[in-house]
Image (tube, grey):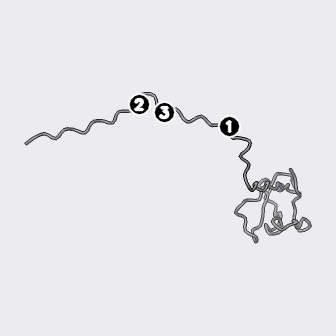
Amino acid sequence: MTEEPRARPILRLKIPPAPRPVAPQPPAREPAVAPAPKVIWRCKPCGAEVVLPDTAEEGDIVRCRNCNANLGKAVHFLSDPPETSRLRARRGS
Ligand SMILES: [Zn+2]
């Protein structure tokens, strides 16, 4: 009965391969469609920044993360132009 040769241990490099350096983006590479700038809203009661989640459904109630005020329905935020008269938030930057 012959002894089976043991599998060789996996050798590890002492120095891990260096991560690829991040190449600077060439300026000529413009995206065909620029992503829409995120609209920043401000809570009227407290002035905190309100970012509408991308996953907001039209019927969702948007609440202020700071004071939990009901700022209105997402549909009124998302309509173009936004129905600011129905919202307790104003556009900010
Ligand atoms: Zn608030």
Horizontally, residue 41 falls left or right of residue 33, namely right
Residue reaching furthest to the bottom:
59
Marks 2/3 in contact by CB < 8 Å: the verdict is yes
Horizontally, residue 35 falls left or right of residue 80, namely left
Q: Mark 1, residues whose alpha carbon is within 10 Å: few (<14), some, or many (≥20)? A: few
Q: Which residue is mark 3?
A: 17
Q: Which residue is mark 1?
A: 24
Looking at the picture, how far across and down is residue 44, in whole percent?
89, 57
Specify whether tag 3 is near ligand 1 (CB below 8 Å): no
Residue 77 to residue 31: above or below: below
Looking at the picture, how far across and down is residue 3, in whole percent?
13, 39
Amino acid type of the residue that numbered disc 1 sits on in the rendered structure: Pro
Q: Which mark is residue 13?
A: 2
Residue reaching furthest to the front:
28
Q: At numbered mark 3, what does the secondary structure look like: helix, strand or loop?
A: loop
Amino acid type of the residue that numbered disc 2 sits on in the rendered structure: Leu
